[in-house]
Amino acid sequence: MDTGPQPPSVAARLARDPKVVCAGGFILFLIVLAIAAPLIAPKDPLAQNLLMTTVSPAGFTDAEPGFLLGTDGLGRDVLSRVIFGTRVSLTVAFVAAGLACLIGSLLGLLAGFLGNVVDALISRLVDIWMAFPPVLLSILLVALLGTGLHSVITAIVVIDWTRFCRVVRTETMGQAQMDYVVAARTIGFARPAILFREIFPNVLPVLIALLTLEMGIAVVVEAILSFVGLSVSSDTPTWGGMIAEGRQIVHEAWWVLAAPLAALFATVVAFNQLGDGLARSLDPVLRR
Amino acid sequence: MTTPRLSIEALSAISLRDGDRPILRRVALSVGTGEVHGLVGESGAGKSTIAKAILGIIPSQVKVTSGRIGFEGRDLLSLSAGELRAVLGRDIALVPQDPSTALNPSRRIDVQMTDGLRLKRGLSVKAARIRARALLEEVQIRDPERVLASYPHQLSGGMRQRVLIAAAFALEPKLVIADEPTTALDVTVQKQILRLIRSLQERHGTSMLFVSHDLGVVAKICDRVTVLYMGKVVEQGATAEVLASPRHAYTRALLAANPRYDRPDTGLEPTPPEVIAALRAEIAAFDANAGAGAGDG
């Protein structure tokens, strides 16, 4: 009853979860690709070669050596462009989701902990905010702010902080009712100490899971904005931009569409699976 | 006679959500130095409200309308939030009811146990941990190092309650409020925990307000007892006397409602309706009186 093995550390638990290991490993691989893109990519992603347009991927007829995933309509190497595309996708994933998480969870913590007027104000704001269709709102925002990476990030933060705010508020409210919070008050803790020392650690697992899910969403939103031409300028390769270009020539060169689509798909699945695994591993009650 | 550690005088409270229904009716009770005072009554009698009023954690829908909670010459009800925080933990501590929810699930026991020691006593992390270890040994935990390194869910209910008791006594408080500390536990563990609470209380000379609905438990641990019904004190006195010769019909009914293991066929009588009716009439008359008194003042 009271004796047994030492509890496994959180890190040890994470390392045992196949979802966390696989998905986390894949995302780590993407991070390496993004950072070391110029070293890893076999070709210049912007170099056109009009004599080598729509070359098939290796293993198909008409394949050319050196173009593993073929070339697009302008003769650019698809593999190199997919590799360089990770840069924009991951930047958006981490910066936009991180900022949305920061703003949303701070407001959510305040609303859930202080209640009353603060809660009413923040909650109404979230309600109104969420009434706007998100994709239209982001297109509108980028149109107003002008295209570019910073406006894509701003658009995602402005729209998606509500997601964090809602969940964190509910979670904080639930935790604030718990006996251990009352017990902390009877030790004579001040309110900020209770919020950050007692409540926040119990909200954190949900928050981390939500953050990784949001990263997946941010990658998709960036791809949508690239697809409609509202993201970074066209001389920066992005998956969304590649999908838009590939769509036009899908009958002659399906791989131009398929390669970025597959990368996008795998990345979003990895983020979602990581979120799922983290939610399980970090939950203190399930920790065994 | 020396002044008692805790003296509650004419404490009244109402429930704002429930049409200003009175939940405490001029309750008076005192806990002497080193005394264990039982607070007994059925659910909704106001036992917990009294405990919460002392600890300053009254829910927002309850309002204290009059009275005084005297502790060491000060009225706890008139202290500012900051002043009360200084008293809580250091001089007054709580042993909570449900050990499964009273510990923070995502913080390890050592961190939770040393919070108060560091915050209120200013001990270093290391000194606080040594003290926490000693406290766990004092509550008869055989493997204190392992318990300190555990998360709450890795401990059994009885073990968690021991941790909470150790934490309550950590700062050598003058008054411990025990809010039904054995209700959520197995019957076999209950007895050990009661014995533990009593021995710690005796060793430290702590005063204790012991909230319970179980007269059997109260008989084992309390020096004096107050019986509450609908927020009114029905009977008060030395435990032995009250239990041996209860003066009030309601106390007799409560005693009859206690299961007797030696005579399984008897006992477990519900409170007779005429006793309840008489009590309610008594309380109605009391309320009418208090209303008239308030009108005079």
Image (cartoon, coloured by chain):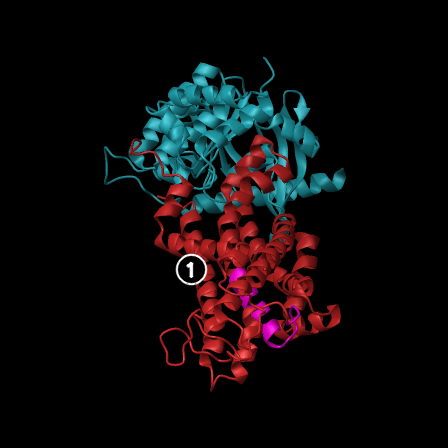
Give above or below for A82 relative to A113. below
Q: What is the span of residues highlighted in magenta in the rendered image?
A: A215-234
Instruction: Please say whether residue B251 is visible from this viewpoint.
Output: yes
* Magenta segment includes A219: yes
Residue B174 place in picture, x, y as percent: 55, 20
Name the residue located 38 percent from the left edge and 30 percent from the top edge: B147
The chain under label 1 reads A
The location of residue B138, given as percent across then percent down, is 40, 19
Picture quadrant where residue B51 is located: top right
Q: Callout 1: helix, strand or loop?
A: helix
Image position of B99 (left or right of B73): left
Foreground of the two, B167 or A256? A256
Colour assignment, chain B: cyan
Please name the residue that numbered disc 1 is placed on.
Answer: A273
Spot the residue most to the bottom. Answer: A251
Q: Residue at x 40, y 44 (%)?
A: B271
Answer with left or right where residue A5 lies relative to residue A235. left
- Viewer can see residue B226: no
> Vertically, is B85 above or below A213?
above
The answer to which quarter of the image holds residue B245 is top left
